[in-house]
Image (tube, coloured by chain):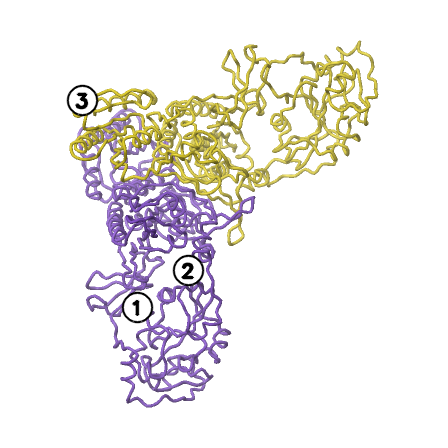
Chain colours: A purple, B yellow
């Protein structure tokens, strides 16, 4: 391809609103242009790399036995109502009504679409397992799109969905997908951190996120300095720095503790103030936070305050849920509640701290004086850390008043005991006991054992060998194509521009003709033709520009190999890898073979 | 690929709502499933053929020098407001507001998006010409989607847009695209009817539609029995069966005609009744129809009734238009007005017959008595056929009253003289004089010289060699991918199913193992492996099904070559083309070479 016949409008200036390096370089190297906030157009050069990432993903999906489908991008609202997610997906899902007033969704994901298509086709265990995937346009109505295609409104996602007659089969496909994902990222030249979430927080099923380190990452990762433990902070666990006790053990441990006693704590509101006032440590404090939760699937029958809650199904076959419920969450004073763990524990779509008004209404006291003793208006969810407190301080449900000598098990009991602790740098690795540290990361991919959520709500059944009806178990597996492409640039660049890995470079070789005329033109054309015959993808810079401009552009767009054809060196040409500083001279007659060998070696090393 | 490892849920029954053969076969052969009205999901088998059509289009676009882009599917409403089409596109364009109340469009076409992207990048004549294209999802909010993917809501279109420093350059690209389109359809095995519209009805610029004959076609084609004249009835012309006269000629011809005279025509309303009443022929009648037009760009300054019309620009740089205007359209009594020609003549986005109330308001008479003589309330548009009437009958703007001896030029003059005649079967070919006939057709592709409409309204300028600013000329070129795929099936099928051309078949060869076990399994596996080594795409039917089921499925899904491996014939196998009735026996050792040769020959014949 001749430079003059393609369209690569490189930019010298860094566009003002592009704050991360991949966004800046995608604009400067003419891979991409912005059409509106969060909406981008790939230009021809960018599309070449985009398609290569797509093809790597496709090849690995096909090799794992997944079958490619092409569902529509726009899907009927009806199937989202069936699954119950019409109500729970939030405003990020773009809904619209057509001219006939029917509801539609621009797909943000496709559990519903695949399940709707396949439930009508699959009736027998002999048709299972089946994994379908698509590489298709998705849309999310981001309120603040930023960082270029890292967080755009429209994006391309590879999303796969698998259906199984038993959980062993789901486990096998889940493992196959995990291996396929590792291969995909390796082939793209990306260093990913696979982050497992098999700590129980996901309700017993498994999931794994594939993260890249990024200073602007959406996610905080908790990593072990010694072993390979890696977890999203949303799900990370650590070794307890206390003794977990059962109710009976806690009661026994509290036997010699003085009886609970109400004390005046005027003008004391924060834990710090209270610690100073009582001359005690935060670890003695039973912190009590009131949370509001939406769409709670946890059965609260018999829980304090639950009898007055509304409970309904969002769809005929969907599980019952409480549209709104409140919880008192207890945790040791020096620790923080992790809202994702809490949401998982109570099976809520969303949790957030209750408003001051709700706190007063539910606890009878202003914010700062909530506590579990005598609290009868809402269910108590206690973190395990509270079980070891047998001589604690906590709010007394009255202004300016606390209890001391409060003991878990003796003075109060929770509705649920679970892990809602936020793990922090410095906590102890649950596997090896070493110290944990934190990193920011961006999620590129996610594999997830969904279980029966969608096949149950959308009534997908098959018959087993004995003619009995069952619902298939389901898994889902996603990769963001744009985000993967941008992450390659984040990991592979220098001050001069992109440094593409061979597998995703828009071209393998750039041939720069110093002046595309006469003997130089003839030599460059011949070299390009030889390279193309050998299957090498070549960009020929035939422009009437100064050599400096051509060198700068070649560095900026980051083609892995550069050949300079100039009059003074012929019949030799200068060859340089993008990562090297110095040229070396090669006989032009030998150049095609040598370059082709390097291309094949680098491709093989990444694809192996 | 093994049948048991892919997903081809063929259907014996014809789905009830599928009325055309391609829709029925796409469902029965498991290429496609319906997710909602007008929204379809391609299954793995269908996607293979879909991608082949896409790839043929891509190769021909690339060969023609077009560059592939990937704009977003969702685009900001802002750019449609700039071009003025926000108001003129009608309800088929899907508009929505996001959570921040901004307007967006799910692209039905992308003149605006390409122009918006490229106007910021192109500043010099040296960057022109440039042709960009995409193969991407489009959406049209069809009120009555039907005929499967022939008229769906979501579809995939290849759309290209070219920009030029002069009209010769546009003409060259337009011709290149016409050739590329002919090659695309030939490679797909499709018989298309290229329909030119260079008769002047498009305002001097050119366009060509690529049609396939179809009983459910949206379009009526006018074809010549002798020469290659082919036109959409919307734009078709024919040889005049009258003498076109100028105003002066008409006046002279009317010299010896009696003066115009008002006559009573009680209870006579239709032309037939009038002809019987006056014992004359319809060709003597000057039919006068009142039309309402929307978004009229024609300058009506000085026309009757125009001074009171509202006139405005839909966008700052867009041409001025009348949101609503009325016209009296004259045509010879035996002819019909073509509304597409009329809309083009008055540069309107839409024309339709005026309501009875508007007719009464504008002509002072009930429907049936409009006529040009003394009509001062609205502009007259006359078809050329009226110019030869020098002793005509026409309405007299009073109930139950007509004029006789009305003469064009003498008794009335039009605001515009043009061709708005609907050409019919039996009319005379404008090229060769032979009789014309009609066919129904579906449009698969369309190439169009747009001129300056978008570059002017969206303010796209470049500098020429002398530093002067100009707007580029523009062309656009579309092909419906789904429609092309369905049309291949419409043209290539028989009672048993699809008969794929080799280029777009999902697989080249189906190998049916009568019983996939023992020696048959070994022989079939070896043959498949040999074929795949030769680059042949093979579907191996390894299912535990009766041979009859496998044969029926092979015919239904239409793989061009079939090989049957059965115990009784080994070491021979049965080979049959899909189009043949009879098998022939071939030594299995020679089968791979022979099949591969046939595949390559058929591919070469179509791709040549």
Tell me where residue B527 sits by quadrant. top left
Subunit of label 2: A
- The disc placed on residue B587 is 3
Label 1 close to label 2 by CB (< 8 Å):
no
Q: Which residue shows up at 59% across the image and 14% down it? A: B426
- Tell me the distance, in whole angstroms, between the alpha carbons under discs 3 and 1: 70 Å
Q: Are marks 3 and 1 on the same chain?
A: no
Between label 3 and label 1, give the one nearer the viewer. 3
Instruction: Assess disc 2: are there few (<14), some (14-19) or many (≥20) residues with their C-alpha within 10 Å of its C-alpha.
Output: some
Q: Position of residue A361 (x, y in %)?
A: 50, 76
Q: Observer-nearest residue: B195 or A46?
A: B195
Q: Secondary structure at mark 1?
A: loop
Q: Which residue shows up at 38% across the image and 32% down it? A: B54
- Tell me the distance, in whole angstroms, between the alpha carbons under discs 3 and 2: 61 Å
Subunit of label 1: A
Q: Position of residue A470 (x, y in %)?
A: 33, 52
Label 3 close to label 2 by CB (< 8 Å):
no
Please tell me which of labels 1 and 2 falls first in the chain: 2
Residue on which the image places disc 2: A319
Instruction: Assess disc 1: are there few (<14), some (14-19) or many (≥20) residues with their C-alpha within 10 Å of its C-alpha.
Output: many
Q: Observer-nearest residue: B577 or A216?
A: B577
Residue on which the image places disc 1: A423
Q: Quadrant of the C terminus of chain A?
A: top left
């Amino acid at each position: 391809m001749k430079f003059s016949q393609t369209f690569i409008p490189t930019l010298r200036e860094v566009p003002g609103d592009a704050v991360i390096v991949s966004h800046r370089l995608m604009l400067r190297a003419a891979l991409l242009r912005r059409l509106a906030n969060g909406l981008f157009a790939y230009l021809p050069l960018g599309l070449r790399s985009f398609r290569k990432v797509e093809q790597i993903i496709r090849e690995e999906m096909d090799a794992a036995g997944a079958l490619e489908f092409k569902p529509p991008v726009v899907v009927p609202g009806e199937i989202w109502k069936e699954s119950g997610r019409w109500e729970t997906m939030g405003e990020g899902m773009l809904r619209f009504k057509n001219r006939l007033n029917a509801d539609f969704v621009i797909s943000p994901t496709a559990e519903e679409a695949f399940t709707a298509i396949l439930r009508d086709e699959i009736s027998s265990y002999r048709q299972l397992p089946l994994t379908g995937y698509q590489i298709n346009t998705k849309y999310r109505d981001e309120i603040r799109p930023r960082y270029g295609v890292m967080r755009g409104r429209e994006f391309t996602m590879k999303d796969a969905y698998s259906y199984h007659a038993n959980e062993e089969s789901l486990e096998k496909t889940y493992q196959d997908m995990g291996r396929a994902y590792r291969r995909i990222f390796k082939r793209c030249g990306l260093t990913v951190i696979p982050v497992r979430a098999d700590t129980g927080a996901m309700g017993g099923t498994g999931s794994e996120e594939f993260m890249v380190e990024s200073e602007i990452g959406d996610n905080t990762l908790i990593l072990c300095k010694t072993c390979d433990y890696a977890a999203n902070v949303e799900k990370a666990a650590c070794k307890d720095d206390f003794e977990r006790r059962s109710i009976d053990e806690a009661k026994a441990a509290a036997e010699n503790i003085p009886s609970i006693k109400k004390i005046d704590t005027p003008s004391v509101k924060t834990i710090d103030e209270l610690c100073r006032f009582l001359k005690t440590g935060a670890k003695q404090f039973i912190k009590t936070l009131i949370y509001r939760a939406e769409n709670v699937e946890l059965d609260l029958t018999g829980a304090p305050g639950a009898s007055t809650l509304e409970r309904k199904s969002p769809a005929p076959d969907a599980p019952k849920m409480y549209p709104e419920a409140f919880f008192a969450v207890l945790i040791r004073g020096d620790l923080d509640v992790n809202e994702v763990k809490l949401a998982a524990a109570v099976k809520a779509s969303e949790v957030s701290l209750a408003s001051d008004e709700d706190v007063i209404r539910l606890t009878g006291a202003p914010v700062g004086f909530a506590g579990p003793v005598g609290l009868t208006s809402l269910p108590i969810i206690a973190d395990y850390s509270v079980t070891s407190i047998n001589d604690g301080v906590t709010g007394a449900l009255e202004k300016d008043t606390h209890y001391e000598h409060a003991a878990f098990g003796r003075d109060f009991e929770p509705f649920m005991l679970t892990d809602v602790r936020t793990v922090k740098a410095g906590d102890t690795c649950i596997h090896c006991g070493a110290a944990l540290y934190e990193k920011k990361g961006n999620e590129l991919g996610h594999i997830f054992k969904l279980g029966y959520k969608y096949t149950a709500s959308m009534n997908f059944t098959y018959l087993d060998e004995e003619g009995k009806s069952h619902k298939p178990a389901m898994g889902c597996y996603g990769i963001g194509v744009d985000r993967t492409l941008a992450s390659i640039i984040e990991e592979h660049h220098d001050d001069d521009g992109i440094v593409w890995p061979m597998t995703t470079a828009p071209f393998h070789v750039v041939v720069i003709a110093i002046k595309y005329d006469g003997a130089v033109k003839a030599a460059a054309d011949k070299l390009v033709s030889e390279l193309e015959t050998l299957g090498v993808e070549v960009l020929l810079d035939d422009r009437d520009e100064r050599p400096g401009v051509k060198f700068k552009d070649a560095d900026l767009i980051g083609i892995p190999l550069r050949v300079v054809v100039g009059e003074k060196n012929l019949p030799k040409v200068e060859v340089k890898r993008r990562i090297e500083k110095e040229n070396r001279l090669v006989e032009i007659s030998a150049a095609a073979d040598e370059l082709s060998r390097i291309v094949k070696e680098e491709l093989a090393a990444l694809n192996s």
